[in-house]
């Protein structure tokens, strides 16, 4: 059994000092144009130094990919100085800094985009209240988007990050190209499972090639994915097994299964003999390290994740207690904070935007 404090070295040479990563969580604290703020830098600094790696909240790679106000941007060279300060502040005491890069696709609106219509693989609105119908991207725009992910990766290298995580999860644009709900194209980017995978294939090849040709040492590339969709049609576990078979053979450093509960069982009747995490881990079969996430708030949870994964990502619990990891690693489990009083939000540097989100996700943990 792997120990929580065991090091892990990725294919590209980067070593994490323990098995914990901070799960990517938007701070909703960036400046209106996506520039990192000092509050945000301090928020991450408070949570680094003990944990193996911090993955930042999603950063958009081009302007029409912005999903919400207060989101980070990596869409222009002008953001590099701020991002460099952020990376340096995370990289304290050996913690590694990874920036998550994304495009929201149809999961944004013309309010956030100041009058611009959102884009996606096809002109199909998401199944959620008040969802706007996006514009289907032209082929040239798809190629430009891949180029912008590559440029964002170069900026992450220049800013001194230790890696990028491609955000292929949580219904944003990378997932939208793979999903039969949002991708109804009949050109080379859609129509069959293989074709719906083309965007991911070209994106991963493009980004990993940028890293490998850049000459940078120990810079990693991870990929986050969601295992299934509730929509019909939607991504099924069979689709995900296909995706994993492809991705596990790519030059990626880790795969990251995005879930709210690491014990979750699939909605597909053919995949209910074990947890989704276990199906995914078995499919990958040691080809690349797997990160598990969702509801980890104790040593027991962390050890459970390691039974079917190599790394543990911690989200909400790192908001409640920035020193969660060191308390576990030094046997001070009884002093872990599991709740948040509204009086603590300043000390914990939690913005109102994140507080509202937490109140929806874990209302029982917020003491009012
Ligand atoms: C405030 C907040 C912001 C989040 N922002 C992101 C994000 O930017 N990118 C992402 O991939 N997931 C995001 N998530 C999802 C988390 O990374 C994580 O997968 C989820 O919260 C489940 O883990 P947990 O139970 O440990 O919080 C966010 C979650 C929270 C609570």
Image (cartoon, rainbow, N blue to C red):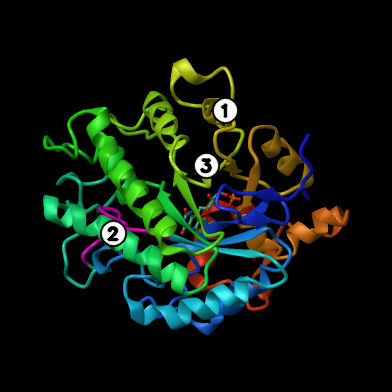
Point 16% across, 57% down: residue: 141
User: How far from the left and from the top, in percent, is residue 271?
Assistant: 49, 19
Q: Is mark 2 within 8 Å of ligand 1?
A: no
- Marks 3 and 2: in contact by CB < 8 Å? no
Q: CA distance from mark 1 to mark 3?
A: 20 Å
In the image, 195: left or right of 228? left
Residue 201 appears at what percent x and percent y? 32, 41
For discs 1 and 3, the disc positioned in front in the rendered view:
1
Label 1: state its secondary structure: loop
Residue 162 seen anywhere in this rendered image of the structure: yes
Tag 2 secondary structure: loop
Left or right for 174, reference 101: left
Left or right, residue 321 beside residue 345: right
Q: Based on the picture, tell me whether residue 351 belongs to the magenta stretch.
A: no
Of the numbered discs 1 and 3, the one sitting upstream in the chain is 3
Q: Which residue has dot 3 on it?
A: 259
Quarter of the image containing the C terminus? bottom right
For disc 2, the neighbor class at 10 Å (few under 14, some 14 to 19, many from 20) is: many
Closer to the camera in the image, 48 or 84: 84
Residue stretch rendered in magenta on the structure:
101-110
Q: Label 2 belongs to which residue?
A: 108
Residue under circle 1?
Answer: 285
The numbered mark at residue 251 is: none
Q: Choose between 207 and 66: the one closer to the eye.
A: 207
Question: Disc 2, disc 1: CB below 8 Å?
Answer: no
- Tell me what residue is drawn at x 69 percent, y 38 percent: 306
Q: Is mark 3 within 8 Å of ligand 1?
A: yes
Q: Quadrant of residue 1?
A: top right
């Amino acid at each position: 059994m792997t120990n929580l404090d065991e090091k892990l070295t990725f294919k590209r040479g980067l070593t994490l000092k323990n098995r914990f990563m901070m799960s990517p969580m938007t701070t909703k604290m960036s400046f209106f144009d996506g520039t990192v703020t000092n509050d945000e830098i301090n928020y991450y600094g408070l949570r680094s130094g003990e944990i193996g790696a911090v993955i930042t909240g999603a950063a958009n790679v081009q302007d029409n990919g912005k999903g919400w106000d207060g989101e980070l941007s990596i869409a222009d060279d002008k953001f590099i100085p701020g991002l460099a300060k952020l990376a340096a502040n995370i990289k304290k005491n050996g913690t590694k800094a990874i920036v998550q890069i994304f495009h929201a696709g149809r999961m944004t609106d013309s309010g956030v985009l100041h009058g611009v219509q959102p884009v996606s693989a096809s002109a199909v609105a998401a199944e959620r209240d008040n969802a706007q119908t996006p514009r289907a991207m032209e082929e040239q725009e798809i190629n430009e988007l891949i180029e912008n992910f590559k440029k964002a990766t170069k900026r992450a290298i220049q800013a001194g990050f230790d890696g990028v995580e491609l955000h292929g999860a949580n219904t944003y644009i990378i997932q939208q190209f793979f999903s039969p709900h949002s991708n109804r194209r009949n050109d080379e980017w859609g129509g069959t499972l293989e074709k719906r995978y083309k965007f991911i294939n070209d994106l991963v090849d493009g980004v990993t090639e940028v890293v490998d040709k850049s000459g940078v040492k120990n810079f990693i590339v991870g990929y986050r994915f969601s295992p299934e969709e509730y929509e019909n049609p939607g991504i099924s576990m069979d689709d995900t097994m296909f995706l994993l078979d492809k991705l596990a053979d790519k030059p990626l450093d880790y795969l990251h299964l995005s879930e709210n509960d690491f014990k979750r069982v699939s909605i597909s009747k053919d995949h209910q003999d074990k947890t989704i995490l276990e199906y995914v881990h078995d499919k990958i079969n040691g080809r690349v390290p797997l990160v598990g996430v969702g509801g980890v708030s104790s040593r027991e949870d962390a050890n459970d994740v390691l039974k079917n994964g190599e790394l543990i990502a911690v989200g909400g619990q790192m908001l409640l207690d920035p020193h969660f990891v060191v308390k576990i690693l030094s046997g001070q489990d009884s002093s872990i904070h599991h709740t948040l009083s509204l009086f603590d939000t300043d000390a914990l540097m939690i913005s109102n935007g994140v507080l509202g989100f937490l109140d929806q996700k874990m209302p029982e943990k917020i003491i009012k």
